[in-house]
């Protein structure tokens, strides 16, 4: 069975972007979904001296291997000060040092949300700009503004679920065709 790796670029145990990514992944019915949290893949701030002296943290080797094994990605993109959070960039830096095209030309969907009215679109625009250079074949992206107006505590609103369904159906079809 084809595999999809799901996570958000957040180290919050209550990450709303993780919630969004998980709910989107639950709309897939014909692939094996693996959900991980970056809270289980901690790493020190990347530095060339650290890499040269101590090598890669085991957590980052494990994550790189998960990237190799999967057939596609659903990634939640939080926004901190108009860009991706430090933990997401740090993870990208560590993983990319093990092989620059970390997404290996595989299908990727990026989802973003925030409690604010722009829904994290600045971080998303940055990610959409840079991730193709890391080998991401971007199938689609989606930003949900005002997260708390669309999430009940157990599920997303019907209208958001319908929008995500279209994106997920397309994503799954592309993965199954490969
Ligand atoms: C340091 C910091 C900066 C933030 N900057 C933004 C921002 O630029 N735009 C925005 O919409 N939300 C911003 N927020 C609010 C985040 O969208 C909110 O904390 C969200 O829950 C983060 O996503 P996560 O829960 O998936 O980690 C910021 C939050 C923090 C802690």
Image: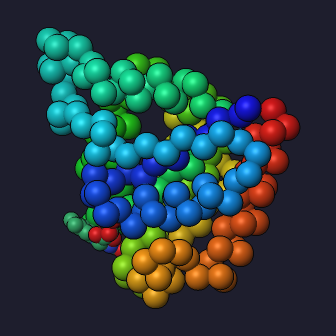
Question: Left or right: 159 with respect to 10?
Answer: right
When asked about the image quadrant of residue 117, the answer is: bottom left
Front residue of 23 and 82: 23
Relative image position of residue 128 (x, y in whole percent): 54, 53
Name the image quarter holding the C terminus.
Answer: top right
Relative image position of residue 114 (x, y in whole percent): 39, 73
Relative image position of residue 87 (x, y in whole percent): 28, 47
Question: From the viewer's perspective, is residue 80 above or below residue 109?
Answer: below
Whether residue 77 is visible, yes or no, is no
What residue is rendered at 65% in x and 82% in y? 158
When asked about the image quadrant of residue 31, the answer is: top right
Question: From the viewer's perspective, is residue 138 above or below residue 3?
Answer: below
Relative image position of residue 131 (x, y in whole percent): 52, 43
What residue is rendered at 52% in x and 58% in y? 21
Question: Left or right: 53 with respect to 90?
Answer: left
Q: Residue furthest bottom?
A: 149
What residue is rendered at 74% in x and 51% in y? 29
What residue is rendered at 30% in x and 39% in y? 40
Q: Residue furthest right?
A: 177
When asked about the image quadrant of residue 142, the answer is: bottom right
Whether residue 51 is visible, yes or no, is yes
């Amino acid at each position: 069975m084809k595999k999809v790796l799901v996570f958000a670029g957040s180290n919050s145990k209550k990450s709303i972007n993780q919630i969004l990514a998980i709910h989107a992944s639950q709309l897939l019915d014909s692939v094996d979904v693996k959900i991980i949290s970056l809270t289980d893949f901690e790493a020190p701030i990347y530095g060339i001296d650290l890499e040269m002296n101590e090598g890669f943290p085991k957590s980052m080797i494990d994550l790189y291997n998960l990237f190799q094994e999967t057939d596609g990605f659903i990634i939640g993109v939080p926004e901190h000060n108009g860009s991706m959070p430090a933990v997401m960039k740090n993870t990208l830096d560590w993983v990319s040092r093990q092989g620059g095209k970390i997404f290996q030309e595989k299908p990727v969907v990026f989802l973003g949300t925030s409690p604010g009215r722009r829904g994290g679109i600045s971080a998303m625009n940055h990610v959409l700009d840079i991730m193709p250079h890391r080998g991401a074949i971007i199938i689609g992206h989606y930003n949900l503004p005002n997260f708390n107006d669309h999430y009940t505590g157990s599920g997303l609103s019907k209208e958001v679920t319908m929008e995500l369904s279209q994106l997920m159906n397309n994503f799954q079809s592309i993965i199954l065709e490969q």
